Image: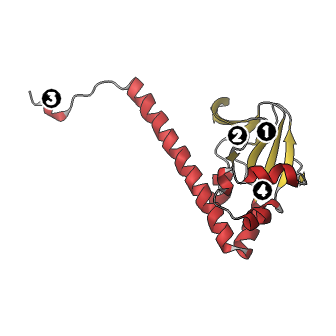
Amino acid sequence: MNSHPTEPLLEVEEILPILNTISLFGGLTEKQLYEVFRLLEKSHFEKGDFVFERGTPPSHIYIVWKGRVELLLDIGGSYLAQTVFDIGQCFGETSAIGIEPHTASAMAVEPTDLIVLPTSALFKIWKTDKALFGMLVLNIAREACRRLSKADETLLHYFAQHEHHTPHPTELQE
């Protein structure tokens, strides 16, 4: 459970126009956006506050409303910055869908306001509106695929930079 307090998201006029620019909500109808909006909450974090820590169970899907959040990998007790999430970007969604503990930690790098969708609300959608739930899960899968592709590119670049030439089997025959 997220120990950081959340409160109702009441800024309808400020939030509704940006919801459909957020990848998680892509392709949703106006009615579906409104249904999701009713379930959203907000939370504030000061610089250095952890949104969640590695190994904790997922409790929310997070969207950066104001500020920035850094995803940190715990490498033997030291943190390595993996990525930074800016306004409109979402994180924590793959842990929520996978029902797996977080594999990294997320920390506010400046005073940050997040829009949060509790996982309990996501699973309520599953019970009440399968089409909406399907669109949300499809959008989460697309975002996860984009991140995986980016991670693959990063790894390929790293290995290309650090690769030692290994002779091709045809070169060994000469």
Which three-letter amino acid code belongs to the residue tagged 4?
Leu
- The answer to whether residue 120 shows anywhere in this view is no
Quadrant of the image containing the N terminus: bottom right
Dot 3 amino acid type: Glu
With 131 as the anchor, is 61 left or right in this view?
A: right
Q: Which mark is residue 105?
A: 2
Q: Decide which of tag 4 and tag 2 comes sooner along the chain.
A: 2
Identify the residue position indicated by label 3 in the image: 171
Residue assigned mark 4? 117
Q: Separation of disc 3 and disc 2 at Cα?
A: 46 Å
Q: Do the residues labelled 1 and 2 touch (CB within 8 Å)?
A: yes
Which element is circle 3 on? Answer: helix
Residue 122 in view (yes/no) = yes
Q: Quick one: SS at disc 2?
A: strand
Determine crowd level at label 1: few under 14, some 14-19, many 20+ residues with C-alpha closer than 10 A: some
- The reply to whether dot 4 and dot 1 touch (C-beta < 8 Å) is no
In the figure, is residue 8 to the left or right of 134?
Answer: right
Mark sitting earlier along the chain (3/2): 2
Q: Distance from label 1 to label 2 (Cα)?
A: 7 Å
Residue 72 vertical placement versus 117 (above, below): above
Q: How far is disc 4 from disc 1 in space, using C-alphas?
A: 17 Å
Residue 91 horizontal/vertical position (percent): 68, 47
Between 136 and 11, the residue placed more toward the observer is 11
Distance from the alpha carbon under mark 1 to that under mark 3: 53 Å
